[in-house]
Image (cartoon, rainbow, N blue to C red):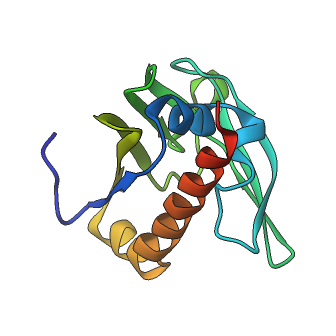
Amino acid sequence: MKIDPETDLVLTRDLKAPRHLIWKCWTTPEHLMPWFVPKPHKVTACELDLRPGGACNTTFDIDGTIMENKGVYLEVIPEEKLVFTDTYTAGWKPAAEPFMTAILTFEDLGNGVTRYTAVVRHRSKEAAQQHEAMGFQGGWGTCADQLEVYARSLNV
């Protein structure tokens, strides 16, 4: 995949948790909610219909402000790749103000380590800069750390 430095933001982490658990945490509502936003913020609702065109909806409580994020999955390759966007909502209805498309890959490095890469694409240079200014690296990095800790706690 070719990265466009003007519109794409990238985060890569080697997580000390098996790929099947990282995948489970990304694709199961009860396992996504505990880690998906930086603490002390929280996910208050989650609907995941894991198929192309299926809903990928989360609701956040950020310091008392409720934020709804509605989107759809574009590609689902179990334990390897997950692509979702807020450009559309369920039923392929165009979103009023699309912001990003996330392309997540999960590579098994052996010994219970997973290389997790998030490529977040934006429709414009300005949208990417806005996301970077919002704290993309810190926020997504904190969530990756929380994901690793939570996945390791599952011991499945």
Q: Where residue 114 sits in the image (x, y, percent)? A: 37, 42
Q: What residue is rendered at 42% in x and 52% in y?
A: 15
Q: Nearer the viewer, residue 58 or 107?
A: 107
Counting labels gives 0
Query: In what quadrant of the picture does the C terminus appear?
Result: top right
Q: Where residue 106 sits in the image (x, y, percent)? A: 37, 36
Q: Is residue 52 above or below residue 112?
A: above
Q: What residue is rendered at 74% in x and 49% in y?
A: 33
Q: What residue is rendered at 12% in x and 45% in y?
A: 2
Q: Nearer the viewer, residue 45 or 55?
A: 45
Q: Where residue 44 sits in the image (x, y, percent)? A: 84, 54
Q: Where residue 101 sits in the image (x, y, percent)? A: 42, 45
Q: What residue is rendered at 56% in x and 17% in y?
A: 51
Query: In what quadrant of the picture does the N terminus appear?
Result: top left
Identify the residue at the far left of this view. Answer: 2
Q: Is residue 60 above or below residue 32?
A: below
